[in-house]
Amino acid sequence: MELDIRSERSDGICVLSLEGEVDVYTAPRLKEALVQQLESGCTYVLVDLEGVGFIDSSGLGVLVGGLRRAKEKGGSIRLVCTRDSILKVFRITGLDKVFPIFADPAEARQF
């Protein structure tokens, strides 16, 4: 399956809405989108995972790398996710302690 990435920027927050699968084949596109947002001056990034059906370690690695870059610029990355299968991956890897994960997109925007 492919990965569709939609981006929008409002009030100094960049939102990346993902739809599809984040795996070894699609993770480079996510990395490119994250780097592009961070390099364009957007240090607060919200990644909406509601449309993601699968994420593997390469996708997680891209998110961790993006978080590191954001923190270097004084920013952060927050996630929106309510899908149990995706949340389970974050819990198993301990990344639920690294990323702020929200069920409500409006709440996640409160950087």
Image: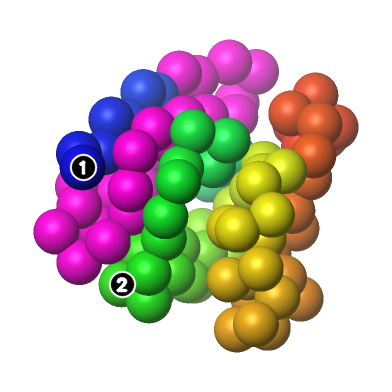
Q: Amino acid at mark 2?
A: Ser
Q: Residue at x 60, y 26 (%)?
A: 12
Provide the residue span drawn in magenta: 8-37
Q: Residue furthest left?
A: 25
Query: 1 and 40: which one is in front?
Result: 1
- The x and y percentages for residue 5 are 32, 31
For disc 1, the marked residue is 1
Residue 23's place in the image compared with 17, above or below, is below
Rendered-image quadrant of the C terminus: top right
Label 2's element? helix
Residue 58's disc is 2
- The x and y percentages for residue 4 are 28, 30
Residue 37's disc is none
Rendered-image quadrant of the N terminus: top left
- The x and y percentages for residue 48 are 56, 36
Give the CA separation, mark 2 to mark 1: 15 Å
Q: Residue at x 79, y 39 (%)?
A: 103
Query: 110 and 105: which one is in front?
Result: 105
Q: Earlier in the sequence, mark 2 or mark 1?
A: 1
Q: Amino acid at mark 1?
A: Met
Residue 29 within the magenta-colored segment of the rendering: yes
